[in-house]
Image: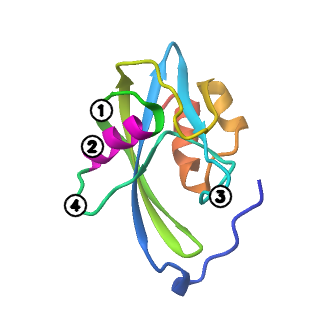
Amino acid sequence: MTPMPPMTPHDASQTVIVTAAVIERDGKFLITRRPDGAHLAGYWEFPGGKCDPGESLVACLTREIREELDATLEAGGEIFSTSHTYPGRVVELHFFRGTLTEEPRPTLGQEMRWVRRDDLQSLDFPPADAELIARLGSGEL
């Protein structure tokens, strides 16, 4: 993937609050690929999305999993949070452990995979996910 361009302070015009589910089953993590036309298209990510104004983090996450994967998420605790500045926005990310009560089915045409912990670092994730990926890869999380 192409590296992100450098940021200047005036580029951070908005903060976007995002939640994502770290779902592990049989030693593999569920990831999806950001679709063409989306911010950071082509990168792999843990499923989730932007919070609506006034929406709690857990409510956002369960809504996003229903919309993206047609599945119900049982959200666990928050395991990691970070923020990252991209051109034009700051993304505040909150990662939660989660369990699905149904088999996920991508509803937005996105690619979906179950990936072993050891293989996470070989895939292209957004820069904001780097520390989480390193911690998962090392077994720290």
Q: Is residue 39 magenta?
A: no
Q: Residue at x 34, y 19 (%)?
A: 101
User: Which amino acid is tagged 3?
Assistant: Gly
What residue does disc 2 label?
58
Q: Mark 2 or 1 closer to N-term?
A: 2
Q: Depth-wise, is mark 4 or mark 1 nearer the camera?
A: 4
Q: Which mark is residue 54?
A: 4
Front residue of this view, candidates 85 and 51: 51
Q: Distance between the residues labelled 3 and 2?
A: 26 Å
Q: Residue 37 carries which label?
A: 3
Q: Distance between the residues labelled 2 and 1?
A: 7 Å
Q: Mark 3 or 2 closer to N-term?
A: 3
What residue does disc 1 label?
75
Secondary structure under tag 3 reads loop
Q: Depth-wise, is mark 3 or mark 2 nearer the camera?
A: 3
Secondary structure under tag 1 reads strand
As displayed, is residue 29 above or below residue 133? above
Q: Can residue 141 be seen in this view?
A: no
Q: Where is residue 45 in the image (x, y as percent from the top left)?
A: 56, 43
**Segment colored magenta:** 57-67
Q: Can residue 94 be seen in this view?
A: yes
